Image (tube, grey):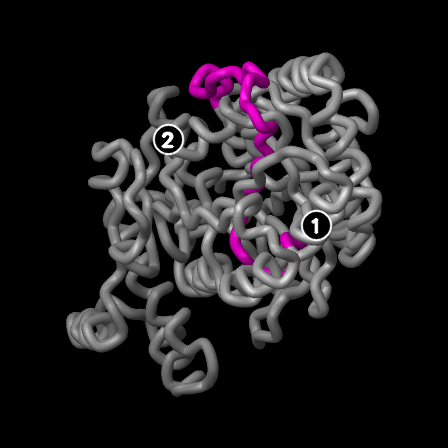
């Protein structure tokens, strides 16, 4: 296929393993697009990244060096009068760095002979790609995910302008695709649903042998993950005399608040905030678990989960999943077939279905097996990356 490039805000990123997997699967299929990262991921937790992929990433210069680089390019006559005029007109208004980053990326793409760039998230990378398309004969597309759709931040180049300008808009679920089509009906034909994927062979299989039963949850410690409700549910289970351990892996701004909640409910010997873990350790803990829980809610700003990768990973491990019926989660978890869905914020219902699964090992195994088969059908990264490539190829200039 003709080449395209990737543009990320930060790559590779601990919180966006689905992006890394996409690039890694392309490499496995013999496709190696250039990868640009606006921010240097130097402060990311250590992961099991393939060094060959990491070495391909070109990080953009930081602000001072970037401005100097663009100034030198201008003096050498590499910038058109339109670009120079846009930089002068925009000045130091909010998001001005996106224009300079676009100049850098656009000139690098010109050197490489590449005329399309794909960004992830309708955020910083997509806004930069927007300006790349304005300044150079380069088209752009982007994959939108969750908060960037449901609770977009107010920028002058906002979601409406991105959708209007992009040649292709990809999103992860039918729910999100329909959301975008209803909001932007004039661009409905450009909006496509492609599920994220993973390599199921990279995951072990849960054996449900933990004693006491182990409840595992993974995610950033932020409001939309609903971990406070999981802790309340654990309090209810403890009050009923149930034996269990709960492990929440992740880090975030609510850590102290959640620790205090655990203390107040006298759950310090039952519920652990384990911090962020490398993917290898996450997979190990999933294999050791009896049930996976992600008690997602809609946060006060309207942010919510769409297609949580951690649910996919739990299904790949053969675990039953307990979650909530928001966003695209019902497209992942089939009620009473691969797990249970409850209303967001309902700790009582959450406790009831967790109790059912830790009490009935055969039921947990049955649901987990069905979940594994569903993951194989829907979330094959080989198949889904081929679909993405074909879509981009069909829309290249």
- In space, the residues marked 2 and 1 are separated at their CA atoms by 29 Å
Q: Which residues are magenta?
A: 199-227
Question: Is residue 372 depicted above or below 17 in this figure?
Answer: above
Instruction: Give left or right: position of 310 versus 230.
Output: left
- The local crowd at label 2, few if under 14, some if 14 to 19, many if 20 or more residues have their Cα within 10 Å, is few
Give yes or no for residue 225 being in the magenta stretch.
Answer: yes
Instruction: Give left or right: position of 245 versus 346.
Output: left
Q: Looking at the picture, how far across and down is residue 344, in whole percent?
A: 79, 51
User: Which one is in front, 303 or 181?
Assistant: 303
Give yes or no for residue 313 being in the magenta stretch.
Answer: no
Q: Looking at the picture, how far across and down is residue 84, in whole percent?
A: 34, 78
Question: Is residue 219 depicted above or below 51 in this figure?
Answer: below
User: Which one is in front, 397 or 269?
Assistant: 269
Q: Quadrant of residue 12?
A: top left
The structure residue drawn at horizontal position 68% and vertical position 25%, both measured from the top left corner, is: 320
Q: Residue furthest front?
A: 241
Q: Quadrant of residue 353?
A: top right
Disc 2 target residue: 280
The structure residue drawn at horizontal position 65% and vertical position 42%, both measured from the top left corner, is: 294
Q: Looking at the picture, how far across and down is residue 384, in whole percent?
A: 56, 26
The structure residue drawn at horizontal position 71% and vertical position 31%, both measured from the top left corner, is: 332
Q: Quadrant of residue 196?
A: top right
Can residue 190 be seen in the rendering of this structure? no
Q: Which circle marks residue 235 in the picture?
A: 1
Q: Looking at the picture, how far across and down is residue 394, in whole percent?
A: 56, 32
What kind of element bears circle 1? helix
């Amino acid at each position: 296929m003709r080449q395209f490039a990737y543009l990320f805000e930060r790559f590779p990123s601990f919180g966006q393993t689905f992006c890394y997997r996409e690039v890694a699967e392309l490499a496995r299929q013999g496709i190696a697009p250039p990868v640009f990262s606006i921010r240097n991921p130097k402060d990311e937790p250590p992961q099991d990244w393939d060094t060959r992929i990491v070495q391909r990433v070109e990080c953009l210069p930081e602000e001072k060096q970037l401005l100097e680089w663009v100034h030198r390019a201008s003096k050498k006559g590499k910038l058109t009068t339109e670009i120079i005029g846009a930089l002068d007109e925009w000045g130091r208004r909010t998001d001005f760095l996106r224009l300079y980053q676009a100049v850098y990326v656009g000139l690098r793409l010109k050197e490489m002979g590449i005329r399309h760039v794909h960004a992830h998230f309708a955020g910083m990378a997509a806004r930069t790609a927007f300006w790349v398309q304005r300044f150079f004969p380069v088209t752009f597309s982007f994959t939108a995910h969750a908060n960037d759709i449901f609770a977009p931040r107010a920028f002058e180049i906002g979601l409406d302008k991105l959708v209007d300008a992009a040649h292709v808009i990809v999103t992860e679920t039918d729910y999100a695709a329909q959301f975008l089509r209803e909001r932007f009906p004039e661009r409905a034909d450009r909006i496509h649903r492609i599920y994220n994927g993973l390599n199921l062979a990279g995951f072990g299989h849960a054996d449900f042998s933990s004693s006491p039963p182990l409840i595992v949850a993974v995610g950033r410690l932020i409001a939309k993950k609903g971990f406070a409700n999981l802790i309340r549910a654990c309090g209810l289970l403890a009050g009923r005399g149930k034996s269990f351990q709960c492990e929440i892996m992740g880090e975030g701004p609510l850590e102290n608040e959640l620790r205090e909640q655990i203390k107040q409910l006298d759950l310090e010997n039952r519920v652990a905030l384990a911090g962020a873990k490398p993917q290898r350790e996450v997979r190990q803990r999933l294999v050791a678990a009896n049930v996976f829980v992600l008690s997602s809610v809609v946060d006060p700003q309207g942010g919510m989960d769409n297609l949580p990768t951690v649910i996919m990973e739990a299904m790949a491990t053969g675990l039953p999943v307990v979650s909530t019926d928001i966003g695209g989660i019902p497209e992942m978890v089939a009620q009473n077939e691969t797990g249970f869905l409850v209303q967001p914020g309902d700790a009582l219902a959450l406790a009831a279905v967790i109790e059912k699964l830790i009490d009935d090992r055969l039921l947990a195994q049955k649901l987990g097996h069905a979940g594994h088969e569903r993951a194989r059908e829907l979330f094959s990264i080989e198949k889904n990356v081929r679909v993405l490539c074909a879509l981009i190829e069909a829309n290249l200039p």
